[in-house]
Amino acid sequence: MPISPNQGSTGGGTLVTITGTNLSGTTAVKFGSKPATSITNVSPTQVTAVSPSGTGTAGVTVTTPGGTSGPVPFFYVGAPFKSSLGTTSGPLVGGNTITINGVGMSTANTVSFGGVTATPTVVSDTELSVTVPAGVTAGPVGVTVTTAGGSNNGLSYTYVDVPTVATVAPSSGPTSGGTGVTITGTNLDATGSVTFDGAVAPFSVVNSTTLSVVTPPGAAGLVDVVVTNPAGSATGAFTYVAGPGI
């Protein structure tokens, strides 16, 4: 007499399908000593029941006018606990793979990012791997893991859109570097790096539309200024000017 699923939340509420023979007229389904909270006789070979609360392993039995079946095991599973995300931000288009760490995650079947679901790969009871789905809008969303034992949330993942660069001001400075530059654009608050002709520049985020940057030393001429965040990069321009020689 197989049952499906054969595991569910310690809080009860799992709809279980029991398959067998001579099930017509079922009068009771018990999980251990506890009766199911709801029973439906689907056919002579199938009954559905909703599990009561419980812990550990419970023997499921079916009672009809002809007697009571032998027990089939049902395993109670606690809700998962998430401790951290391996990566806390990524592109709005999704597609990047992150890890989720915690405990009780071996039966995980879905991970929701702000209501958009993805199917995880179970690495172990303490680790999941999941490809992030595309987000609806840029910004933080809650992450929910659902297992046979229930759901848990409390972690946040931030969707980031591709940056744009509108202005680099001033647009020129000495080859020795050290020029304070303001870069304006959009989606700049998640900036991870700024480079001038490939050379890394120190920067600080003022807000989502403004960066404060100090130019590194560079060779004379027009160079690319590249602003990068987890979603991609945007390019502006800056001119290095050589000092006078005598």
Image (cartoon, rainbow, N blue to C red):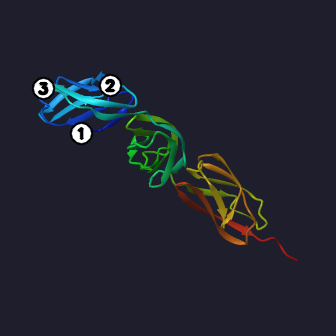
Q: Which residue is mark 2?
A: 52
Q: Which residue is mark 3?
A: 66
Mark 2 vs mark 1: in front:
1
Quadrant in the picture for the C terminus: bottom right
Secondary element under disc 1, as helix, strand or loop, is: loop
Q: What x and y, as percent, mark residue 231? A: 52, 55
Crowding at mark 1 (Cα within 10 Å: few <14, some 14-19, many 20+) = few
Separation of marks 3 and 1 at Cα, in angstroms: 19 Å
Q: What amino acid type should be assigned to the residue bearing mark 2?
A: Pro
First in sequence, mark 3 or 2: give its number: 2
Q: Is residue 182 left or right of residue 84?
A: right
Q: Nearer the viewer, residue 60 or 218?
A: 60
Q: What x and y, as percent, mark residue 243? A: 81, 70
Q: What x and y, as percent, mark residue 111? A: 42, 43
Q: Is residue 245 left or right of residue 165?
A: right
Q: Nearer the viewer, residue 40 or 230?
A: 40
Q: What amino acid type should be assigned to the residue bearing mark 1?
A: Pro
First in sequence, mark 2 or 1: give its number: 1
Q: What amino acid type should be assigned to the residue bearing mark 3?
A: Gly
Q: Which residue is mark 1?
A: 2
Q: Are marks 2 and 1 in contact (CB under 8 Å)?
A: no
Q: Are marks 3 and 2 in contact (CB under 8 Å)?
A: no
Question: From this viewpoint, which residue is outermost toward the bottom?
Answer: 246
First in sequence, mark 3 or 1: give its number: 1
Give me the residue at 32% from left, 28% from top: 13
Q: Quadrant of residue 58?
A: top left
Q: Nearer the viewer, residue 193 or 37?
A: 37
Q: Nearer the viewer, residue 53 or 90?
A: 53
Q: Are marks 3 and 1 in contact (CB under 8 Å)?
A: no
Q: Quadrant of residue 165?
A: bottom right
Q: What x and y, as percent, mark residue 186? A: 56, 51
Secondary element under disc 2, as helix, strand or loop, is: loop
